[in-house]
């Protein structure tokens, strides 16, 4: 049985270069590498997330010559993408490789495509080479084929031997009101997958498949950053961070990178049910 997360502990001072004007509160969540940052609103959150992305990109390129990032899906990160595209961050986009945490099984031009959202709000506005954009190929014959092709692309890119998982520099995730993240939904067999990197998860209540990276991939990353905004996410956030009734089986709290920080970047509305 998974134990409830320890209570939040406040830490004095702002982390890194986050502006005091935007930062509201900073908490450590149970252990030093798990941190909650609460911002005044969605705009402040998106701006800080773009700064975090840019800083990690600069560090990764300086240290290793490239930056590998997993982008989130849905509509939640749109403002984050827009700010990242518009800021003069000094990101060396020629050294950036982007992947996706999950994708709906729809064509890339479909309005619900996660790739299309990122393409229109971010990638089309920055000088990133097309070869550096590693999207999930939903043109495959089946969801399982799409998952297998994407896993092979990741394995080839990172030159991974069998049994090894990639170490992305940064994974950016969202949180659903039901506690799902990427396309790891409560009750899905995909949540317990510990061998494959990519699976085609059948989302029964939606009547469709989604292609998703698995927990071992997220937990092998150098850093993971959750973006959570809005009061409709408050209950899920409280359950994810503090446990309690209804927290068993939630996928999001199972994301705990083994060798890097976990940042929960949330706005005040989303944090409304957290104990202070």
Image: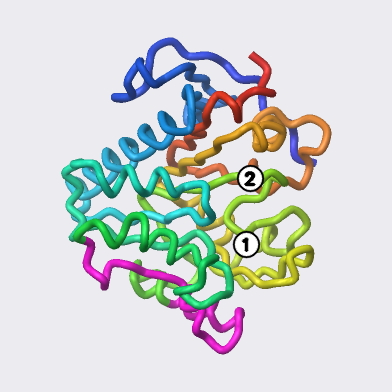
Asked if residue 229 is positioned above or below residue 92 in the image, the reply reads: above
Residue drawn at x 54%, y 55% is 74
Along the viewing direction, whichever of 90 and 247 lies nearer the viewer: 90
Query: Where is mark 2, residue-wise?
Result: 252
The magenta stretch is: 128-152
Left or right of 152? Residue 239 is right
* x and y, in percent, of residue 55 in the image: 27, 38
* Residue 19 placement: quadrant: top left
Rounded to the nearest whole Å, what is the CA distance between mark 2 and mark 1? 16 Å
Which x, y percent locates residue 217?
Answer: 51, 57
Residue 148, x across and y down, in percent: 53, 79
Give the residue furthest to the bottom: 141
Mark 2 or mark 1, whichever is nearer to me: 2
- Does residue 147 show up magenta in the picture? yes
**Residue 197 shows in the view:** no
Specify the color scheme: rainbow
Question: Which structural element holds mark 1?
Answer: loop
User: Does residue 198 sit above or below 57 in this rendering?
Assistant: below
Q: State the image quarter where residue 190 is shown.
A: bottom right
Magenta segment includes 151 = yes
Q: Residue at x 29, y 42 (%)?
A: 56
Q: x, y percentage for residue 120?
A: 36, 61
| Residue plotted at (43% across, 10% down) | 12
Q: Quadrant of residue 158?
A: bottom left
Q: Secondary structure at mark 2?
A: helix
The residue closer to the viewer here, 244 or 87, is 87
The N terminus sits in image quarter: top right
Residue at 46% across, 78% down: 137
Which residue does the numbered mark 1 point to in the structure image? 194
């Amino acid at each position: 049985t998974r134990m409830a997360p320890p209570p939040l502990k406040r830490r004095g001072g702002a982390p890194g270069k986050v502006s005091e004007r935007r930062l509201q509160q900073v908490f450590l969540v149970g252990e030093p590498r798990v941190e909650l940052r609460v911002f005044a609103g969605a705009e402040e959150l998106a701006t800080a997330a773009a700064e975090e992305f840019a800083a990690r990109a600069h560090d990764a390129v300086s240290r290793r010559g490239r930056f590998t990032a997993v982008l989130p899906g849905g509509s939640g990160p749109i403002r984050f993408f827009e700010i990242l595209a518009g800021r003069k961050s000094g990101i060396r986009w020629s050294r950036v490789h982007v992947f996706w945490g999950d994708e709906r099984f729809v064509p890339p031009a479909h309005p619900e495509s996660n790739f299309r959202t990122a393409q229109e709000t971010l990638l089309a506005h920055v000088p990133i080479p097309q070869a550096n954009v590693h999207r999930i190929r939903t043109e495959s014959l089946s969801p399982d084929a799409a998952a297998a092709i994407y896993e092979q692309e990741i394995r080839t890119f990172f030159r991974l031997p069998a049994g090894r998982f990639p170490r992305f520099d940064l994974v950016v995730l969202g949180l659903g009101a039901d506690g799902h993240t990427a396309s790891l939904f409560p009750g899905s067999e995909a949540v317990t997958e510990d061998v494959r990197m990519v699976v085609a998860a059948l989302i029964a209540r939606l009547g469709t498949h989604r292609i998703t990276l698995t927990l071992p991939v997220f937990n092998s990353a150098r850093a993971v950053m959750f973006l959570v905004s809005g009061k409709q996410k408050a209950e899920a956030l409280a359950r994810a961070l503090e446990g309690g009734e209804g927290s068993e089986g939630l996928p999001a709290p199972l994301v705990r990178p083994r060798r890097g920080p976990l940042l929960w970047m949330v706005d005040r509305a989303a944090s409304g049910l957290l104990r202070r």
